Amino acid sequence: MLEYGLIIGLVLFYFYTVTCTFLAVQIAAVKGRRRSWCWLALFFGAIGLIVICCLPNAKGVEGETNPVKMALKKLTAVSPAVVWIFVLGLVVVVGGALLATSFTTYLQNRAHEKELNAGTGDQQILCPATVADGVAGIFTGSGNNFAVNQSGALYGWGALNMTALDESGKLYENVLKVQTVGDTCFLLTKDGVLYARGDNQKGIIPNQTAAWLDAFVQVEPDVKDFSVSETAGAVVKNTGNLYVFGSNIYGQLGLPSEKIADTNARLAQNVTKVVVTARSLYYLTADGSVYATGSNAYGQFGLGNTDTQSVPVLIGTGCSDIAAGSDFTLLLKNDGTVWSAGSNALGQLGRIPLEEAEGVHSEGGEEELPPPSAKVFGQVMIPVGVTAIDAGGSTALALLGTELYGWGDNRVDQLGSGDPLFYAAPAVIHKETALFDTSGSCTLIYTQGGKLLGAGDRRNYQLGTDRDNSGFSTVATVQEVKA
């Protein structure tokens, strides 16, 4: 009877410990602490051991009946079978804990690997990150990626030159939007103040003469939206007035000045959104009209020519959103259709139907490449009903319901699949998307289930993990998941 009591106690203790370890792993995964599960599991296991050791004797039974106390007291006196059961029980407890951890990690990896729609090739690293209080916005940049939570706390990964405010990795507070250009960072707070810091050798930060700014300086108050590039920038005030600054080499500021060093130059009124690229500037007005100014070298203004426009010219009507890459433009119409114009060297115009794209999604010969450009707007081949678009470099994204379509450049796997070098036809790359953003070389997706995923370039650790897992360069807590 005593041996049976010992067996029952060890079995119960085994299942209790494994269960506690499994729960501890889950809690640690949610909280983003990679090692805390060990201490949590040991804590729960110690509680279980104490409980078992403190079990009283059964009523009406003389002598010691607690299985653990008996095992410790009479280990050499009991039969060899019981000794082996005790030793094997401890081995099983440790093995069960390790098995639970490995199994949990395996399931997490499988789930995260499937988050982006992979082809048959190897995927880049997907990087879900834990950001306290839920994600409200995600922003990709040149070597940096950022997430802003519901309360406005800013987290980031990559070639950051910013010191965290506390041990949680929070970089800044009360943030609405952030954008980086090289080593220059622009930040818009929830109270409408635009700040900037970092490299200013090209004078991209208005009203400043220093070549480098170690701390954030105020650029402009009462700001609703902004956009910056390597050469120029623009702010949309709460009044709807659009002000521009920076270099005007390509006529992208739409004004006679060769360079504007402050934010006092008004370009337009009733503006709701602005997009600035290295050589062009686009803005959307309240009545759905889209205007563009600057370089039109690839016909990206859809005017049928490649002439530079030094003053704003109307390029679209009935629009609800705009996006632009380095050499192409996207317009989202009020009816949910997407239109494109400009360079098509990597399929970024997305005008080939998916059913006709066999062999075009490839790195093959010239006969498989799409037409090089289109100087007038044409419809992107995705279903009607798109609600948001984004573009960067030669990569384009569009959200239809919760399905995220991607097309264009995929040379660094920024569309989440390592097979083709480009997508000439839009393809679904994620099916449960809540938020998305692309810089052209890196894509971030925040899923309906609350996971933050990244694909593409990670040379600056902007997906939160090193290539060979030899180290991390993270500001917010990031969990590596290998494909």
Image (cartoon, grey):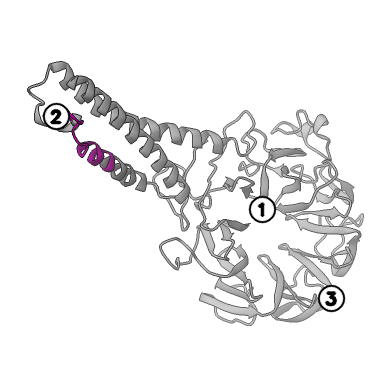
Q: Compare residues 418 and 331 and report the one nearer the observer.
A: 331
Please tell me whether mark 2 sits on a helix, a strand or a loop. Answer: helix
Q: Amino acid at mark 1?
A: Asp
Q: Range of the magenta residues?
A: 47-65
Q: Which residue is label 3 attached to?
A: 269
For residue 111, which quarter of the picture?
Answer: top right
Which class describes the residues within 10 Å of circle 3: few (<14), some (14-19), or many (20+)? Answer: some
Of the image marks 2 and 3, the number of the one nearer the N terminus: 2
Quadrant holding the N terminus: top left
Of the image marks 1 and 2, the number of the one nearer the N terminus: 2
Q: CA distance from mark 1 to mark 2?
A: 63 Å
Which class describes the residues within 10 Å of circle 1: few (<14), some (14-19), or many (20+)? Answer: many
Please tell me whether mark 3 sits on a helix, a strand or a loop. Answer: loop
Q: Compare residues 27 and 370 and report the one nearer the observer.
A: 27
Q: Is residue 443 above or below residue 149?
A: above
Q: Amino acid at mark 2?
A: Met
Compared across the picture, whether 160 is left or right of 72 comes to right
Query: In the rendered structure, are the residues bearing label 2 and label 3 in contact, judged by CB atoms less than 8 Å apart?
Result: no
Residue 51: in magenta span: yes
What numbered label is drawn on residue 70?
A: 2
Magenta stretch: dominant SS? Answer: loop
Q: Compare residues 95 and 310 and report the one nearer the observer.
A: 95
Task: Mark 2 vs mark 3: give the one in front.
Answer: 2
For residue 456, which quarter of the picture?
Answer: top right
Q: CA distance from mark 3 to mark 1?
A: 27 Å
